[in-house]
Amino acid sequence: MKTTLVMGASLKPHRYSNMAIRSLVDKGVAVKAFGLRQGEVSDITIDTELVDYKDIHTVTLYMNAKRQEDYYDYIISLNPERVIFNPGAENFEFKELLDQAGINSEMACTLVLLSTNQY
């Protein structure tokens, strides 16, 4: 099963990261989530500590470029197949680091990819 890690997960239903978790679950995608506040969205626990997840296929980012800096090494260490920079999360510095690590990345919207069956 291909697992997606949502970085910047929110408990607030109107936030795009929350919508993404719900949409991923609805599509049958295995989900892990990391955010500032612990809780659950669609029975997915939002972790507030970095976990050494195994078999992460996709990391989808819902945090701005400045906030991402603290997580560069962590995300690269997970060795995902791809990282999605959602709107507002674009980060060309991190994209370059991912390219150097052999990790695919794309500037895209997880919700659009899911709704158009391109995920």
Image (cartoon, grey):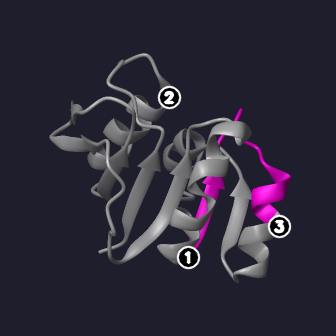
Q: Is residue 45 visible?
A: yes
Q: Residue at x 47, y 73 (%)?
A: 78
Outermost residue toward the bottom in this view: 102
Marks 2 & 3, CB-CB < 8 Å contact? no
Q: Which mark is residue 16?
A: 2
Give the labeled residue for mark 1.
Answer: 81
Question: Residue at the spot x=52%, y=78% of the render?
Answer: 79
**Percent position (x, y) of residue 77?**
51, 75
Dividing the picture into quarters, in which one does residue 94 lie? bottom right
For marks 3 and 1, the one nearer the N-term is 1
The residue stretch that appears in magenta: 81-95
Q: Which mark is residue 96?
A: 3
For the point 28% across and 45% down, the residue is 47
3 or 1: mark nearer the eye: 3
Q: Is residue 63 left or right of residue 96?
A: left
Local packing at callout 2 (Cα closer than 10 Å; few below 14, some 14-19, many 20+) is some
Amino acid marked by disc 1: Glu
Visible residue check, residue 80? no
**Marks 3 & 1, CB-CB < 8 Å contact:** no
Marks 3 and 1, Cα distance to the nearest angstrom? Answer: 15 Å
Amino acid type, label 3? Glu
- The N terminus lies in which quarter of the figure? bottom left
| Count of numbered marks | 3
- Relative to 118, residue 55 above or below: below
- As shown in the figure, which amino acid type bears the numbered disc 2? Tyr
Relative to 111, is 106 on the left or the right? right
Q: Is residue 59 left or right of residue 48?
A: right
In terms of secondary structure, where does tag 3 sit? helix
Whether 101 is drawn above or below 4: the answer is below
